[in-house]
Amino acid sequence: MSSHREAPEISKDPVADSTDLYAFVSPDKADTVTIIANYVPLESPDGGPNFYEFGTDVLYAINIDNDGDGKADISYLFEFQSETTNLDTFLYNTGPIGSLTDPNWNRRQTYTVTKILSSGKMTVLGAGLPCPPCNVGPLSTPNYETALANPAIQTLSDGSSVFAGQRAEGFYVDLGSIFDLAVLRPIAADHILANLLPTMSGINATKELNVHSIAIQVPMTELTRHHRMPTNPAAAQSVIGVWTTASRQAATVLPSSPKSSGMPTYAGPWVQVSRLGNPLINEVVIPLSQKDFWNHSAPDSDIQFAQYVSNPELGRLLPVLYPGAFPHLSTYNSGTVNRADLTAILMTGLPSGIIGGFQNFTGTVQADMLRLNMAIPPATTSATLPSNLGLLGGDLAGFPNGRRVFDDVTTIELKAIAGATLPLVDTSFTADGAVGLVDQGLTSSGTDQTAKATENYLPTFPYLGVPHSGYFTPAA
């Protein structure tokens, strides 16, 4: 969660497991869009001696739809290569790593970025680009940010900035409570099994964990349909849809002898094994029997999953698990359930007229994509301070208008499923009072980055913070 270990098969394949996707107008460079795709969930910073890395047998892609058909008009492909420079040591490094070319670093990765258009035109934007090492500790990776992470920020041939490497996990979530029969700590006293629950504050399950990020900052004119700067929030051309995928080749051939030192070989077409657009879709909306199928499917075919979005299981469970807390939702569920609000938020975007001054509608094709209205400026001034509740907090630059690193998407989606957004499409419905109490109790935000937070967000690209050091990993 947001998409960590969300399906049976991909949970066995962490290097191909897309965990989070972010897309937002860059707050310090407002003529660009930053897209971040995270992989390798729940990295413990002290996970050596074989520290985490991208898969050299995985094809990673960031996909952009700019005409509303749920198909990629632009894709950025990322392919990684690994090199072991000293074959006679078990160590990741034999001394301090002082630079990205330091001979003390034994296991390094580079990558190639290729842009492909729907016309089939392919352009290599960069090759041999360096990843930084994992943040091992103060002796192995001193001056991590200045000597290793910052030099790994590269400029591509089209002027875009790119970074690929380890980052601090930026997604914060109370996994322990949510997956324990949907306990919402602020209203835990109303749970049907409340007598078994102690009173506790929210716990960030991803605190002090790391992740591997692919981040790209692209001029908006490279993303729009006609290569024009989006300036009108009401225009359809200002909205793009974004999703990320990971693919593997269809066939894997293992070495024929157990004594062989050869590596597996791969052949055949690329087969998609993971995808992610909006957070939490496959996690809590798609049923267990369909999760792996969802990961193999393309967004333009998502109409086949429409029933799960328009009548989500969690929305039916909340009044049962919290008897008396959600009477209005309970009454609504007793009739014909049609959560058109969730369908709009997650599958088509919100049309004009629902929220004043805002739309991110991409058309009638139902497709799971992060939809970003690029003509809405980032909330960075004193008059428009960002809210980590995004649109629910009155901040038009936040989720579900794309997704920023600090947006509390779990709380936003829980509130929406509980009925907070239903009055937008059904004026006869009044949200239950308990909806206002639904909260994780985790307070990371765009302006308060210290309270109950260890995400270490940065004010500039790549925005996700310096990864946590293995040496300082706290005891369990």
Image: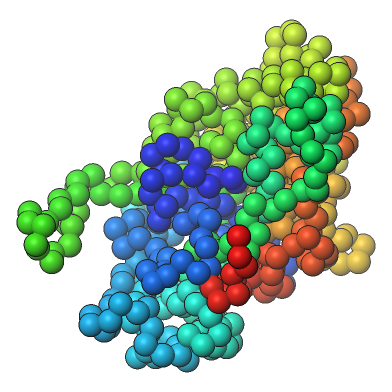
Residue 380 in the figure: left or right of residue 170: right
Going 37% across and 78% down the picture, which residue do you hit?
92
Q: Is residue 350 visible?
A: no
Residue 255 is situated, as x and y percent measured from the top left of the image, at 11, 56
Going 48% across and 50% down the picture, which residue do you hit?
18
In terms of image quadrants, where is residue 150? bottom right
226 vs 110: above or below: above
Going 17% across and 57% down the picture, which residue do you hit?
265
Residue 458 is situated, as x and y percent measured from the top left of the image, at 69, 72
Going 35% across and 56% down the picture, which residue do you hit?
59
Residue placed furthest toward the top: 335
Residue 163 is situated, as x and y percent measured from the top left of the image, at 51, 72
- Quadrant that contains the N terminus: top right
Residue nearer the viewer, 322 or 458: 322
Residue nearer the viewer, 411 or 86: 86
Question: What coloring was used for the rendering?
Answer: rainbow
Residue 279 in the figure: left or right of residue 448: left
Residue 8 is situated, as x and y percent measured from the top left of the image, at 42, 37
In terms of image quadrants, where is residue 426? top right
- Quadrant that contains the C terminus: bottom right
Residue 118 in the figure: left or right of residue 233: left
Residue 323 in the figure: left or right of residue 85: right
Q: Is residue 412 visible?
A: yes
Residue nearer the viewer, 329 or 472: 472
355 vs 114: above or below: above
